[in-house]
Amino acid sequence: MSLTWYGNQAAVEGRNFGSLALIFPLLERMKISEIINQHIPADDQAEFDHGLVLSLLVAARLYSPVALTGVAEWAADSAAGILWNIPSEKINDDRLGRSLDAFFTQRHSILASLALHVAREFRVPLRDVHYDPTHILLRGAYDPVETRDPVVADSGTRSDDTLAPAHIAPGRATADAPLGALMIHAGLCTHVDEFGPLPFFGHTTDGNQNGHTAVAEQLALLRKHLPLPQLTMISDRGTFSVGHLLRLRDAGGTAICSAPWDEFRALFDERRASLTWKKASYLSLEQQRRRAVHSVLPQEHYELAVLRHELTDADSKQTIAGRVVFVFSTADQKVVRKQRQKQIDKLREGLEQIEQSVAAGRRSTDPESVTRRVAKLFGSKDAARYFHWEIEPLSAAARVRLPAPSRGCKRATHRFAFRFDQTAMQHDEQYDGYSVLVTTVPMQQASADALFTKFKQQCYSEQVNGQFKVPLAVHPVFLHTPERVEALVFLLMITLQLYYQLQRLYRQTVPAKATAKERRTTTATMLRAFHSYILLIHETRLGREVQPTRLLRGSVRFSTVSGSRRRPKF
């Protein structure tokens, strides 16, 4: 039995050191501050160099995202000012802003140098690159910024201080971006292996640009700052074009890219009867689990059919040989048909209501009003093309034969009718579950089955984009200038790299006999484990003594440092 009692107030202060115990040593090992200072000229009059200030900002964004004006308070509460040896009163938004301005002028070079260092330090092969762009919403009133000059020019590839910031402009409306919302696009290059994803390079494009522009500019910047031998770029159909395949070929690289189905439907119809289908070896984690436990849930699978094909660029008329991989998914087939039927049922119900309203002579049943109601009902639904409708005026004799209108209605003047095109629906059903990949990777280098497995890792790239917006709080963003906006986005790319590198380091040290859950431990889990970790600070006659505490979480004990001058190492 143990006793608990309350003592007198101790002459000691507590600081919520938290996840800085994980973040700081990795910042040092990645040499973020050192690499930034190598590219940005030192200011002899500056009290603190840009690398020190910006590495502090990286830690702040990963620890607990706050506005620039709140970084000083965070540094005081977390003891970050002690680690960086910057008094909290010296950390203000003007100092952070000036460092962001300097960082902007060397943003691509810094990102590339960091990628090379991380590749060497952590033995990461930068060869297969997953690329995926995403939009970043911006808030506030920004000065008008003209569409910037292209990245690729006759004089070479613009970057760093020769490339203006991305044009903040209204982009395409999405689920989280209303029509007219201000945005820019950020594309990330990500390495993926058994330890998960690792983003290592990126770029921004104007808010009104598309994936074709984004991937072309990204490739040009890779060639300039990070020339990768035997590069294979993997991307989604928004980036596909024959021009993209040709540019990669000219750079000595290859592509694995999903493509719009409509561009290859005619080829599929032409060769469908002669295609040879084979079951793919790739299975999702859920499908692997179902098979391992003999689940009664459906066991879905993919089938692949490969076709050698020569593609022609419509503009340059150049050709390139490749492989077209038609993919059939049993799960996608079920999902597409379920979604289609759901749309059909909803549209049929709405049309029946309109039909009844017109027949009853209710309000808003004149031809103009009915046309507006149908247009609103159809919207952008794909299933709308299966329905045909018409509204016709009734003759005087037909109106006389109608029953007396009910209360609040008038005698109907028109007849509304619709029909469902079963043949059109059946025509579309024959393509349910099918998609297409295009690759220029030689057959002797990798089979279509291996390439498909590699392409399915693209979901990790999409996961990285999701993390880009959530724990790093890139949304919403408001800074005074587009240059600072872009500088912060690039700094967040570095933060994201640190975030996933921490996860990878942990997974690489997990014993082989560990559970699947432990092998998939995430950075978020580790940061939460250190959330309440406290440092004790004693003021003595010789100075300030920092005393670490012991962290206990469940049955797992994390060893922390002892002594004020020692720091945790990975």
Image (tube, rainbow, N blue to C red):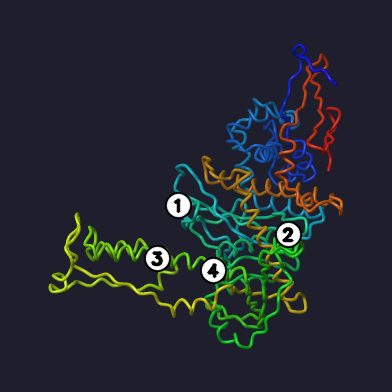
The disc labelled 4 sits on which kind of residue? Val
- Tag shown at residue 347: 3
Vertical order, 552 against 370 (above or below): above
The tag earlier along the polypeptide, 2 or 1, is 1
Q: CA distance from mark 3 to mark 1?
A: 25 Å
Q: Earlier in the sequence, mark 3 or mark 1?
A: 1
Could you say which disc has been placed on residue 506 in the image? none
The residue that disc 1 covers is 178
Q: Which residue is mark 2?
A: 192
For label 1, count other residues whose C-alpha is less than 10 Å away and answer few (under 14), some (14-19) or many (20+). few
Give 347 or 192, whichever is nearer the viewer: 347
For the residues labelled 2 and 3, the Cα–Cα distance comes to: 43 Å
Q: Are marks 3 and 1 in contact (CB under 8 Å)?
A: no
Quarter of the image that includes the C terminus: top right
Q: Quadrant of residue 332?
A: bottom right
Residue 265 visible from this viewpoint:
yes
Confirm or deny contact between disc 1 and disc 4 (CB under 8 A).
no
Q: Position of residue 472 (x, y in %)?
A: 63, 44
